[in-house]
Amino acid sequence: MKIATFNINGIKARINALPDWLDEAQPDVALLQEIKSVDEGFPREIFEERGYNVETHGQKSFNGVAILSKLPLEDVTRSLPGDDTDEQARYIEATVVGERDALRVCGLYLPNGNPVELDDAGTPIAGGKYAYKLAWMERLKARAQVLLAEETPFLMAGDYNIIPQPEDAARPNAWTEDALFRPESRKAFRELLNLGLTEAFRARDPRTAQYSFWDYQAGAWNKNDGIRIDHFLLSPACADMMTDCGIDKDIRAREKPSDHVPVWVNLDV
């Protein structure tokens, strides 16, 4: 089973590029972020005619996540547990049944967190975007703990807005004070890994200069001035199923690209 994650940065802007990539890459499951569409406005017919079941959790103009699956989706849930007041559409879960095993897939669009707002003691200011990011990561950690306790194979994939290590940025010094690379953000990411999760790409590819995002500005793509912020975290049972993982970098050079590119894993499910 091939599962991909792709921050498309707007379904209207990617209305041609996304189907073209699906036809070429043929993922069995695609987890999408930043669809920037309400559910009823998502052009599901384009994907259904390609054999995909479509589930969305959208909102107008920004955020929004979706699952496209050639296999049936069961027990679909929307929104990350832990905060009933959170109205941002950033999380969707479903169970996919393979030839032998069932797999819980969790698609996420983790908050960016900028601007970083700190008090005089260096503590994130309550109500600020950085505090929201860190609180969201705590909720994600709690959800992972629940899924681990259930012992169902699962993965959490999407745009994490986290640069895990200096080698995951072309210019790490430029990101020192950014919410994507601040020590609190990276610590929260490590805490997820320390639950026993495997970061799929790094488990397969230790090379530097492997990125999944290039800004539209300042010629970042041509300079390969990128960062790696789109990740697959696999439960132990899911990690045992992994046979490969990669980044479809060349998609960024095509017409009207997203600023992100797809990342994918192959699982023996």
Image (spheres, rainbow, N blue to C red):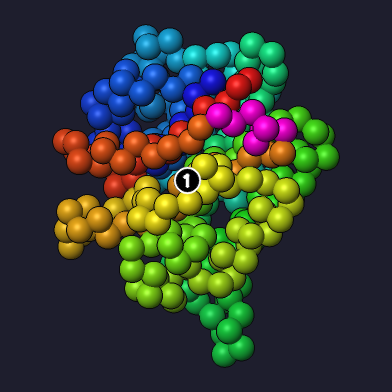
Q: Amino acid at mark 1?
A: Asp
Please give the name of the residue rendered at 63% of the width and 20% of the height, measured from the top-left corner.
Answer: 269
Q: Position of residue 70 (x, y in %)?
A: 49, 14
Please give the name of the residue rendered at 39% of the width and 19% of the height, measured from the top-left corner.
Answer: 26
Asked if residue 269 is positioned above or below residue 123 in the image, the reply reads: above
Magenta region, residue range:
237-243
In this view, which residue lies farthest toward the right? 149
In this view, which residue lies farthest toward the bottom? 120
User: Between 204 and 143, which is closer to the camera in this rendering?
Assistant: 204
Q: Indicate whether residue 239 is drawn in magenta.
A: yes
Asked if residue 162 is positioned above or below residue 268 in the image, the reply reads: below
Mark 1: secondary structure: loop
User: Position of 68 compared to 120: left or right?
Assistant: left
Q: Position of residue 249 (x, y in %)?
A: 31, 41
Q: Position of residue 214 (x, y in %)?
A: 29, 53
Question: Can you tell which quarter of the image residue 203 is in?
Answer: top right
Please give the name of the residue rendered at 73% of the width and 48% of the height, measured from the top-left corner.
Answer: 196
User: Position of 231 compared to 34: left or right?
Assistant: right
**Which residue was labeled with disc 1?**
205
